[in-house]
Image (cartoon, helix red, strand yellow):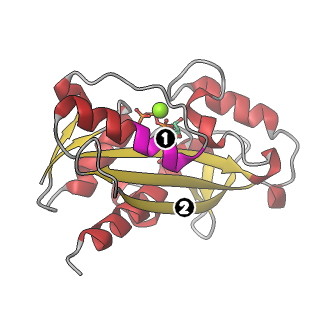
Amino acid sequence: MKLVLASGNAGKLAEFRELFAGTGFDFHPQSEFAIDDVEETGLTFVENALIKARHAARISGLPALGDDSGLCVDALDGAPGLYSARYAGSHGDSAANIEKLLREIHGVPDDQRTARFVCVLALLRHADDPQPIIAQGTWEGRILDAPRGDNGFGYDPVFVVPGLGLSAAELDSAAKHRLSHRGQAMARLHELLQPQ
Ligand SMILES: O=P(O)(O)OP(=O)(O)OP(=O)(O)OC[C@H]1O[C@@H](n2cnc3c(O)ncnc32)[C@H](O)[C@@H]1O
Ligand SMILES: [Mg+2]
């Protein structure tokens, strides 16, 4: 199946390149079709994943996969959550997002720094597909008080994986895929795509 990946995030695209390897999907980033970022007007990860996939499917005429994801921090009532990419104002995987998160959570004791990454994938066979396939994954962890590690992207350097004692940015990509919200959502998507 030829598929457009409806994302402009280089970190996500690098992960999907590995996650799709050997699956038989012929996957193409939206930039190959000159598809621009669409406004994320939804109030849930599901809505935004669908908005992205629909936009890419409409322009390309191909099936499209949208990924809407984010980091939900309990001590901040779930923030940055849906607004993870725009937390510090402008859009993107900026150091400013991490700085704002560390400022907001400053002084919160270790046992109250629980958080989870959320990933929702939405696959549309065409832009007007009324039966999207939706797969979700979550990854539980805690927020560090300073960034650690150089791998991954986004909030990975401040997300520590309990049990391992490593930040998500200290994991190699294979280890991240085994544990991560995106790795789990992809595994679920594969299950849902198996013939019943
Ligand atoms: O919408 P697209 O084009 O896919 O790209 P985006 O970066 O805007 O993506 P989102 O709207 O889904 O926002 C996701 C935010 O959550 C962060 N995020 C998502 N998955 C992550 C991961 O695996 N590790 C670290 N941060 C992640 C990411 O850095 C963004 O700030
Ligand atoms: Mg986005």
Q: Which residue bears the numbered disc 2?
A: 138
Q: Nearer the viewer, residue 69 or 150?
A: 69
Q: Is mark 1 within 8 Å of ligand 1?
A: yes
Residue farthest to the top, as pictured: 90
Across and down, in percent, residue 10 comes to 34, 33
Mark number displayed over residue 48:
1
Q: Quadrant of the C terminus?
A: bottom left
| 81 left or right of 56 in image | right
The residue that appears at 42% across and 65% down in the rendered structure is 184
Q: In the rendered structure, which disc, 2 or 1, sits on the residue that comes first in sequence?
A: 1
Q: At label 1, which amino acid type do we have?
A: Asn
The residue that appears at 64% across and 33% down in the rendered structure is 98
The residue that appears at 83% across and 38% down in the rendered structure is 106
| 194 left or right of 83 in image | left
| 104 left or right of 174 in image | right
Separation (CA) of disc 2 from disc 1: 17 Å
Across and down, in percent, residue 102 comes to 74, 36
Q: Main secondary structure of the magenta part?
A: helix
Mark 2 nearby-residue class (10 Å; few <14, some 14–19, many ≥20): many
The residues colored magenta run: 44-51
Mark number displayed over residue 1:
none
Mark 1 nearby-residue class (10 Å; few <14, some 14–19, many ≥20): many
Q: Quadrant of the N terminus?
A: bottom left
User: Does residue 178 appear in this view?
Assistant: yes
The residue that appears at 70% across and 48% down in the rendered structure is 144
- Report the mark closest to the observer, 2 or 1: 1
Residue 47 in the magenta stretch? The answer is yes
Residue 66 in the magenta stretch? The answer is no
Q: Is mark 2 within 8 Å of ligand 1?
A: no
